[in-house]
Amino acid sequence: MNPTLHSLLQFLQTWWVELTCGVVIVAVVPLIAGYVVLVERKLMADMQARLGPMRVGPHGLLQPIADAVKLLIKEDIIPADSDKLIFWLAPVISMTAALTSMGAIAFGPSFQVARDINIGILFVLGVSSLGFLGIILGGWASNSHYSILGALRSTAQLVSYETAGGLAVISGLLLSGTLSISGIVAAQEKQGVWFIFLAPVAVFIYLVASIAETNRAPFDLPEAESELVAGYMTEYSGFRWALYFLGEYANMIVVGSIATTLFLGGWLRPFPNVHWLNWLDYIPAVAMLLLGVYSIYRAGKQPVKVQTGFMWAVALACFATAAVFAVPWFVATLKFVIPGLNGAFWFLLKVAAYIYVFMWLRFTLPRYRFDQLMHLGWYILIPLAIVNVFAVGIAMVLEALGWSRWLALVPTTIVTLAFAALLVRWHDRRTESASTASLAQDSYAG
Amino acid sequence: MADTFQDDALRNHGTLLGADELVLNMGPQHPSTHGVLRVKLKLDGERVRGTECVIGYLHRGVEKIAENRTYQQFAPYVDRMDYVAAVSNGLGYCEAVEKLLNVEAPPRARVIRTILTELQRIASHLLWLGTHALDIGALTPLFYCMREREEILKIFERYCGARLTTHAFRIGGLQYESYDGFEKDVERFCNDFERRIQEYVDLLTGNSIWIGRTRNVGVLNAADCIALGASGPILRAAGVKWDLRKAQPYAAYDQYKFEIPTGTNGDTFDRYMVRIEEMRQSRLICLQAIENIPEGAIMGKVGKVIKPPAGEIYHSIEAPKGILGYYVVSDGGTQPYRVRVRPPSFINLQALDKMVRGHLVADVVAIIGTLDIVLGEVDR
């Protein structure tokens, strides 16, 4: 046999699972991101007493596809005085970083491209941070004032909030004792508790920091529409813009996955070690079945035949998924895939819940101002994160000295919370005195 | 080359790191300049060092048009100035010409005018609240506000057939009798509205981000307000209890009890609170007014052809955005010799530079929002 072909075959034989997973990620994540956008619009519409997209497909189900087609066929505009190479490269960097970091994330116990890198979490954090390079370069290359302001804001925001987020991740790592993603989940399984209950402060810090990292409201200053038009994306249009947009939503999935892995028990079902709750394992199949039944119910209410048909298709897809979940229970030779399938279901459910919180905050809260954002980051979140790391560390030491884990963690968490309250009070007092000072200055200037 | 560089460095002294000041052109196409306002910002980083407003993109020469129209023909034009408070504009113009003619609208007309104008004030404030909150980044209040505004616009539509530029009033009174169920519609709206205001208050007033974004932002004290001629909620938020509805009552305002809400600091938060409270007061006025609408004619004794005696008159009302004045000069003919409008938005906009200096870019949009300008009225 041709040696090249042989080595190629060998390569494929060794890596075919990873390659398939990689292709699946590159092919499916943009689609998922598109549907996350649809879900966001629908949720926003629901909270704002309106309907949201309704025209393309039943209840707007085909809207993301229509949007993608529209963006693909739009005119490709590159501003005259821009740095063309970097302008072209920036959105690609953004998107690539988001997709690459997904490679190390485990969506369930058996779906992971880069299986068991022993520094998995570090890899994900590092690579996903590279996405900011795309934002900064894009803002710079556009040669526009709004873009450069957006990019500058983005840089400052990254530096402040990656720090806080990283420190929050460290508290999770202290509890698990490993950087490997499957190791972290295994630790939570072994200890029988999700780390959110052991380190609630760290989860909160990570939530805030991850909202800021993904440029979501109330920290969406780099692209604050009412101030900077679209921030670093101002000069982008068509598919380049779509790449940024998809990158942002893919990033949401990434930070959601990190939080899920680290604090929400990854792919474990609730109470993984309680055996009388084993019936929870049937939930994935039953949930998909119910979703299918509901789709059929909605199908009857569609105004147009095409939409009814599409709703039936959705129902069939749900039934098919339900069947995939259910069949292994009845076929003994397929029993081994159950943990993988159920794991993926729980994992995605948790990520969805995390992203839902993102969206909920976005619809509710006004936007921070830039100096307030920096204050919150440097004066509150980072000190709190540092204290939290120490508190968790002290609890670990106490545990090593023979205390039970809960006994050690409860007082340290209370101390951290007290410190948080103190920080907020200091902050309030400082902003009050600062504002009166600036008032006095203004009256002189007047 | 080196020399040029040094010169540049010398020329740019006084700013941080010797860097250039950035001139950012905000508008006329910008998501949050509320129309076609163009603001040139001189920035040091994100801090505003100076501003320059460029207006006139929506100039239509309304005042000049008046000189070539009869008094009645000009009435619809005033609706196009502050187009989110068309009813108030119409009221001011009609009353000014009535004063010139020395006629008075009948009591029934005056009460219906009061109800519609107060509803318009609520609608205008609702639009302000929604867009202002949107500028500051809160997405949801806009849609709640639009939902309530829709109810008011429906009442307008049932009354006169138009929703936005209503031309609801005529010189001398009203053209249309109030429709069947008018009182009931207004009452239903007012009863619901208290609960709805509470929704906005729940979303915004106690929200620490909202407070952080509005407290001590764009402070304009009473002396500055008076010096710049700012009026309406901006003046009242600075603590000056000046409302033409009380000071020089027009329409039927002398018959109703209401408070004039005032603030203390004159900052964006106070202006927000004043406007929220004004909506509550307007609601109370409407509720009082529908209880007893007098019977009788709706049109005063005004001929088909309006020919006021030669003379001049200035009449001002408290529009939602501030004092709206009409100065009408008649030479005895059927067309006004000159109409001059004192638009509240235009004069309030003067305060922008003073309010913005030293703040950040993000505050600029908050301050433009809090001024509650409508470019149709600024440019005319």
Image (tube, coloured by chain):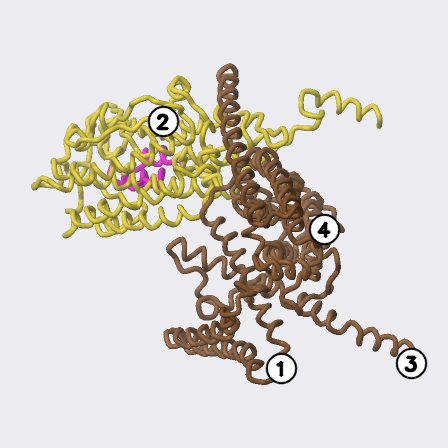
User: Type of residue at label 3?
Assistant: Asn
The chain whose colour is yellow is B
**CA–CA distance between discs 1 and 2?**
72 Å
User: Type of residue at label 1?
Assistant: Leu
To which residue does mark 3 refer? A2
Question: In the depicted view, which residue is nearer to us: B313 or A228?
Answer: A228
**Residue displayed at 73% across by 65% down:** A115
**Crowd class of label 3 (few under 14; some 14 to 19; many from 20; radius 10 Å):** few
To which residue does mark 2 refer? B237
Colour of chain A in the rendered structure image = brown
Reply above or below: B7 against A251.
Answer: above
Query: For residue B64: magenta?
Result: yes
Specify the subunit that label 1 lies on.
Answer: A
The x, y position of residue B88, in whole percent, is 28, 37
Disc 2 element: helix
> Which is more foreground, mark 4 or mark 2?
4
User: Type of residue at label 4?
Assistant: Gly
To which residue does mark 4 refer? A126
Same chain for the residues under marks 3 and 2 in the image:
no
Reply above or below: A72 against A121.
Answer: below
